[in-house]
Amino acid sequence: MTVEITAFRWVPEPARGYVKDLRVRWALEEAGLPYRVALVGPGETAASTHRARQPFGQIPLYRDDGVDLFESGAIILHIAAKSEALAPRDPAGWARTTAWVFAALNSVEPAGYAVMDLGPAYSGNESKTEQAGRVRAEQRLASRLDGLAVWLNDRTWLENGRFSAGDLMMCSVLRELLDEGLLADHPVLAAYTRRGLDRPGFQRALAAQLADFSPHP
Ligand SMILES: N[C@@H](CCC(=O)N[C@@H](CS)C(=O)NCC(=O)O)C(=O)O
């Protein structure tokens, strides 16, 4: 069967281009694998048929002849296993790629969300406890970004001068921070993210996601 992914038929305008099926589309583009898209509406992810495939009622979903998967990280690694374009074939290179996918999802993405979820800084209405929480979240994110910037320094990609699923996931995660102005102190990371987003595979994936949205819920 042709690979099938599940994505939202409609999301509010600001979320368009950021829904996480984008990462999966990007991986499929890099791997050169054709796919079809099953679109679901806003209420449909609560259905038992959807929950049977994604316990949290989220997207993306993925299936092919061999597997039915949820969680974008698992899906990206499954696609990477099919294509050298996304990961080296040698066990050590493969293992390093998996490490970077986890680093993006486990070490960077939650730290970024913790800051973004707080909303704009210095509204003037925050209590001392809230201010302290914000400072802690910002410090945690800065520490993750500092570490990544030192690692990247003058590298083009995370490992061995070649693009991999690790870069795909890291650039997907950093893109939201870039767009929120949270990479302003990390020009190395901003340049790295733009390098990822300039790839034709990302551009095709983004255009495909945007084209799939209905104008109305
Ligand atoms: N950890 C999941 C997160 C998926 C996720 O956050 N999906 C969002 C769209 S980007 C969603 O379905 N939100 C609706 C909801 O959580 O009810 C993954 O990486 O696949």
Image (cartoon, rainbow, N blue to C red):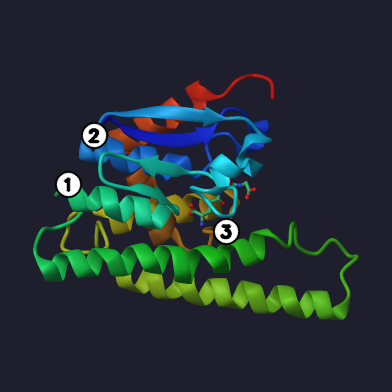
Q: Is mark 2 within 8 Å of ligand 1?
A: no
**Badge 1 amino acid:** Ser
Q: Nearer the viewer, residue 131 or 214?
A: 214
Name the front one of labels 3 and 2. 2
Name the front one of labels 1 and 3. 1
**How far apart are labels 3 and 2 at the CA level?**
33 Å
Tag 2 and tag 1, C-beta contact below 8 Å: yes
The residue wearing badge 3 is 182
Looking at the image, is 103 positioned above or below residue 10? below
Q: Position of residue 138 (x, y in %)?
A: 63, 72
Q: Position of residue 163 (x, y in %)?
A: 23, 52
Q: Which residue reaches farthest left?
A: 90
Tag on residue 33?
2
Q: Quadrant of residue 150?
A: bottom left
**How far apart are labels 1 and 3 at the CA level?**
33 Å
Looking at the image, is 154 positioned above or below residue 35? below
The residue wearing badge 1 is 83
Looking at the image, is 74 positioned above or below residue 209? below
Query: In what element is the residue under mark 3?
Result: loop
Q: Which residue reaches farthest top?
A: 215
